Image (tube, helix red, strand yellow):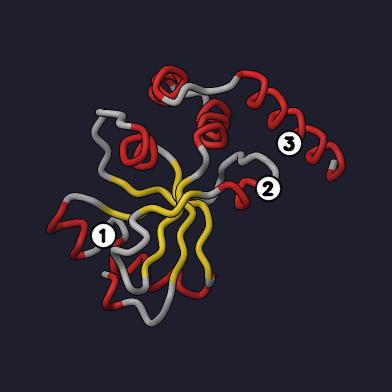
Amino acid sequence: MDQQLPGPVELHCLGGFVAATLHGLSRPTNDVDYVEIVPQHALQVVEQLAGRESVLARRSGVYFQHVTVASLPESYDGRLTALFPARFRNLRLFALDPHDLALSKLSRNSPVDREDVAYLANAVPLDSGLLQDREAAGSRAAARWA
């Protein structure tokens, strides 16, 4: 996929892929969820090369999925961590900070997401005060737009 991209493409990743890759979560996942793509016009290319119906997905069982609805803390992009920084020429994967990842999962409130947050709370460990601060900052930002 990397060689087929027309130039540098940055993906802001979240979900089980990040929890497994950075924090050792053993729950299997077959998707690489991403919430942001830069440049935006690369979305169609990434979908064709690595989306759910792609040759890559059929061959490897892993696919990239653009998440269009996600609750992310304010300024999350300033806390991203590079994944595999020297591995690819064009593909640049970035992971949410563990606290931002936990908040994004808590907002979905599914049983699997709650289990992932419990895992992160022990593995990282998460700072409850920092979680509350970021949640409050997000609530204030949402109130400004309401």
Q: Earlier in the sequence, mark 1 or mark 3?
A: 1
| Horizontal and vertical percent position of residue 99 | 55, 32
Up/down of 30 relative to 111, above or below:
below
Measured in 3D between alpha carbons, the distance from the residue under mark 1 to the one under mark 3, in whole angstroms, is 35 Å
The residue singled out by tag 2 in the image is: 75
User: Dot 1, how many residues are within 10 Å of its Cα: few (below 14), some (14-19), or many (20+)?
Assistant: few
Q: Dot 3 corresponds to which residue?
A: 138
Labels in figure, total: 3
Check disc 1 and give the amino acid type. Answer: Glu
Question: Element type at marker 1?
Answer: loop
Label 2 element class: loop
User: In the picture provided, is 3 more to the left or to the right than 36?
Assistant: left
Q: Quadrant of residue 142?
A: top right
Quarter occupied by the N terminus: bottom left
Q: Which of 138 and 56 is in front in this view?
A: 138
Q: Tag on residue 125?
A: none
Image location of residue 78, percent across then percent down: 62, 51
According to the picture, the residue beneath numbered tag 1 turns out to be: 53
User: Which residue: 18% across, 50% down?
Assistant: 61
Q: SS at mark 3?
A: helix
The residue at the point 27 percent across, 38 percent down is 29
Mark 1 vs mark 2: in front: 2
In the rendered image, residue 23, in percent from the top left (x then y), is placed at 36, 33
